[in-house]
Amino acid sequence: SVEAAGGALGHAPVVAALCGALAELAGLGDRSAKECFTAGYLHDIGKRSLPDFLLSREDTAEGLPPTDQAMLRGHVVEAERVIGEWGLPRSAESLEAILQHHERLDGSGYPHALKDKQIGVPGRILALADSYDEMTSWRPHREPVTARAALAELRREAAEGRLDGPLVERLAVLLAPIV
């Protein structure tokens, strides 16, 4: 259901707004900021094909059987199909960001285990915005954390080589009024 995948007024608009603002702070220009915003809004649309038991699970993806993990992780590829099928606004840049938003700089992400420069800046921005909102929003398996705690976790992940450190610091600038 749409509600379980983020809701009409929940996760997607927050991620989109963060993506657009981070793209501007990163100096990507108006067109790229718009593409990052679009990617942020549409990034989880592929979850519409997932069964409710995966969307409302009480544990993380790592706690699922391999077949369920694969199905859940397939939402990034499914998003590209859905966007095309529905004729939604898209560009190569926004689609690439959507496909890359679960990739990590150390190669530990999915769907293609990309590393470092293989992940575009829009994909890095979307990964960061999505992670931040996931941590600060209620989920079936845990309570939300504060903006300060989420930023600390994102900094830890950047220090461990999974997220883009300079982008995390740009997010810190963006969050300064609430942290």
Image (tube, rainbow, N blue to C red):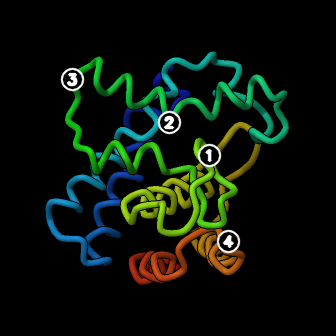
Whichever of callouts 3 and 2 sits on the residue coming sooner in the sequence is 2
Q: Which of marks 1 and 4 is in front?
A: 1
Q: Is disc 1 in contact with disc 2, using a CB cutoff of under 8 Å?
A: yes
Whichever of callouts 1 and 4 sits on the residue coming sooner in the sequence is 1
Looking at the rendered structure, which numbered label has been put on residue 110?
Answer: 1
Whichever of callouts 1 and 2 sits on the residue coming sooner in the sequence is 2
What amino acid is found at the position of numbered circle 2 in the picture?
Val
15 to the left or right of 33 = right
Query: In the structure shown, which secondary structural element does the residue marked by tag 2 occupy?
Result: helix
Q: Give me the C-alpha separation between circle 1 and circle 3.
A: 25 Å
Q: Give me the C-alpha separation between circle 4 and circle 3.
A: 36 Å
Q: How crowded is mark 2: few (under 14 residues within 10 Å), some or many (20 or more)?
A: many
Q: Is disc 3 in contact with disc 2, using a CB cutoff of under 8 Å?
A: no
Q: Is residue 49 above or below residue 20?
A: above
Looking at the rendered structure, which numbered label has been put on residue 157?
Answer: 4
Whichever of callouts 1 and 3 sits on the residue coming sooner in the sequence is 3
Q: Residue tagged by mark 3?
A: 87
Looking at the rendered structure, which numbered label has been put on residue 76?
Answer: 2
